[in-house]
Image (cartoon, rainbow, N blue to C red):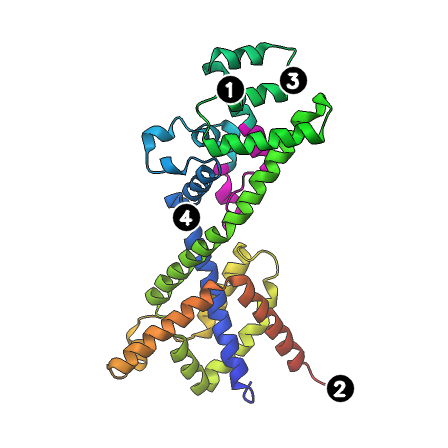
Amino acid sequence: MENLPLLDIVIGLSLIYTSLSLLASELTEYTITTLKWKQKYFRRCLMILLGESSLIGDPEQFKDTITSRILLTPRIISVMQSVRYRNRAMMLSDVPPLLFSETLLEVLQNLSQSSSSRIQQYTIDHSNTQLQSIQTIVEESSTLSPSLRANLTRLIRQVETWEPNPQRQMARLKHEIARWYGHAMAEMSPIYKHHYKLVVFFVSLGLTIAMNVDSLYIIRRISENTAMRAITTQNATQIQGCKASLNSPQCTERLSGLMESTTIPVGWQDSNRRKQFARLDGVIFLRTIGSWSLTSIAIAMGSRFWLQLLRRLGTFLGKDSQPRR
């Protein structure tokens, strides 16, 4: 659009940011999965929740912790292994609260097999309710940390007060433990999300430098080249075909094709580098570093944001190009 060069520039940058955001997202997921960073962070948070944070750096003592027993149960292992395939990296834990509650109670009941004779007596004594047996394990087991023992004792007393029916007490206890776990994970999630966004930014920065995506230089080139603006505007109207999943093969293929046909000045090829670095001095160096940083921030904003912007611009341009009656 010759009368709206600013709009053409926004379209060109949005097209770049959309494609690179998809790639940065995949690289971030691969990095987190390969390093098992999410599982390690979840284990750390779980140890803090269960009062075992003092043993985080001691692998030998970690084997005997409640955290270790929980993480080694088959159901928890199954859930943690499926994290990558559900593409929910922004979630601190994919372990549902009720599953954690059931697993914790199962671990506590298994403690009676290797604990004191008093715990075993309470466990096999059918005159005692399940809640009383759990309470005895909590009070007598030396495996539990003081803070975990205090929290479980508080929850058990609440259940005894609120639910007088012995047959419903265990169900109520599972619910209360699930609520306690859910609230704790909700409080820890912002810290995880902050660290995750830092990872996304540094991945985006590495990708930006590797592909030499200089936003300020791109703005200058698009504003000076009318033919480039025309091709960019035409391609923006085609983004409407990418409506399904952001990570679908059809969407990725369409974006790649548009990037190739748009010929936006990115990369380290000689022709592009000579124009980008016409002279080498401190001002050009600082400008390039600042531009790379701005590009990285834009990429870290996510492909969904930029794709929605492209769709709206494409819809606007499509309507604007229709003949008026």
Identified at 57% across, 23% down, the residue is 135
Q: Give the CA separation, mark 3 to mark 2.
A: 81 Å
Up-down: is 152 above or below 317? above
Which residue does the numbered mark 4 point to in the structure image? 32
Foreground mark, 3 or 2? Answer: 3
Which residue does the numbered mark 1 point to in the structure image? 110
Which amino acid type is marked by label 4? Ile
> Mark 1 or mark 3, which has the lower sequence index?
1
Identified at 73% across, 25% down, the residue is 164
Quarter of the image with the C terminus is bottom right
Foreground mark, 2 or 4? Answer: 4
Which amino acid type is marked by label 1? Asn
Answer few, some or many: residues within 10 Å of disc 4's Cα (few below 14, many 20 plus, some between 14 and 19). some
Q: Which mark is residue 325?
A: 2
Foreground mark, 4 or 1? Answer: 1
Quarter of the image with the N terminus is bottom right
Q: Which residues are magenta?
A: 80-104
Q: Is residue 274 visible?
A: no
Answer few, some or many: residues within 10 Å of disc 3's Cα (few below 14, many 20 plus, some between 14 and 19). some
